[in-house]
Amino acid sequence: MGEVIVVTSGKGGVGKTTTVANVGTALAMRGKKVVLMDADIGLRNLDVVMGLENRIVYDLVDVVEGVCRLKQALIRDKRYEGLYLMPAAQTKDKNAVTPEQMQKLTNELKESFDYILVDCPAGIEQGFRNAIAGAEKAVVVTVPEVSAIRDADRIIGLLSAHGIAEPMLVVNRVRYDMVRRGDMINIEDTTDILGIELAGVVPDDEKIVISTNRGEPVVADPKSAAGKAYRDVAARLMGEDVPFAEKTESKGFVSKLKALFGRNG
Amino acid sequence: MDNTVAFKGIPGGLRLVLHPDTAWDAVLDAVREGLTARRSFLEKGAVYFDVTGRTLSRGQKKELLDVLQRDVDLTGVRFDEALRPNPAPKNRIVKGPVRSGQQIDCEGDLTVIGDVNPGGEVRAAGNIIVLGNLRGFAHAGRDGDRKSIVFALHMAPTQVRITGYVARPGDSGTGPALIYLDDKNVMTIEPIVIGSRQGGEGWVK
């Protein structure tokens, strides 16, 4: 029986789709059978980020309306064994499905997959209610900014009211240099206010922009710091105890010297 | 069937709490059963009955008296017409965090064990005590009790109101503090140093 995990945030643009794409891919890289489900009907993005948009024939609304069978709408990612995408519809909107229909869909998927990651749209209205309908667990994504944290707090309260009790937190787009200068909220203050367990801290990484445009999730790149962070999130979701990396991005004078003279300088 | 009649010991006798909706015959049966079960207690001496939980007609009262008097030495029976044996407690204790968008309201004094996050709102007719960080909105004395206070272990609210008066403590919000309305209707913040003896001026309830 698989786990249905909804990835949500309240605030838009903090990295839900990127998190779903990368954590899902990382889980598949670990041998799990994973479905990435795009619940952002009308504004679908997960297909683009995964580089699978050209292969969409049927979508989630087609399945719910009975136009096609569930299997026909699932797109197999040829790069990773066991990784599938259930795309959203682009020409409809959030009212095209009900929470009950979503729950029926995820229940059916649970029987053949280990993880179903649901990419939740921004907001707290119908789209959100649809996305959380079948979920037992949640990952809340935020960035270290007051507005995002405020929205994340609201979302955590709403999740709790809907029976999803202990979501895990991903703090995204962290810039350690700004944190050190005191220009960006640090992780402890963020988890202090939100009060939920940390699933991962993802540094701001230029490679994300590139990978999104190419449709190649960054977890595949061993040199990407964000990729490593997302692989760690996947490991923690699998129950592994992965310690959080110390802030090693030191661009100070001494480390620049070290870089100049090589490791043994 | 179990909560048709509840028997509670009181000084000098028993309180009978009758279920308000159960059929009257079933209530009488339950009373008879309960009295039989307590035979040894009832035989010890004269007994007083306090009957509550249900409004009874004259006929019903008579029937109940018949049952109570059988084999019992009665000192008295009182019919308490108030229908709520357990009035709802007014004071509330709420476990935090009170999250953004959540609202807590209280008819009496409200104690939050934990934080009130920004965007969260707590209101009370009485006092508000936050055993945590108050970073959201608090409104004490909402019905006009100007002696109400707001206390927090860390006072950094977006806004505090007492009755109709508004305050937004500056960024000096650090340690424990309480906010009260002084004689001149000025919202005053008084830091509290825990573990030391506080001087007498300022807020006195």
Image: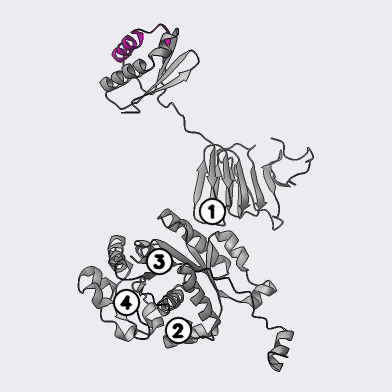
CA separation, marks 2 and 1?
Answer: 36 Å
> Vertical placement of A57 versus B66: above or below?
below
> Vertical placement of B33 versus A148: above or below?
above
CA separation, marks 4 and 1?
Answer: 35 Å
Q: Which residues are magenta?
A: B56-84
Task: Mark 2 or mark 3: name the one nearer the start of the chain.
Answer: 3
Please indicate whether residue A180 sits to the left or right of residue A12 in the image: right
Q: Position of residue B103 (x, y in %)?
A: 50, 49
Q: Is residue A45 visible?
A: no
Chain to which mark 3 belongs: A
What residue did someone put label 1 on?
Answer: B120
What residue did someone put label 2 on?
Answer: A212
What residue did someone put label 3 on?
Answer: A5
Q: Secondary structure at mark 2?
A: helix
Q: Secondary structure at mark 4?
A: loop
CA separation, marks 4 and 3?
Answer: 23 Å
Q: Nearer the viewer, mark 3 or mark 1?
A: 3
Three-letter residue code for mark 2: Thr
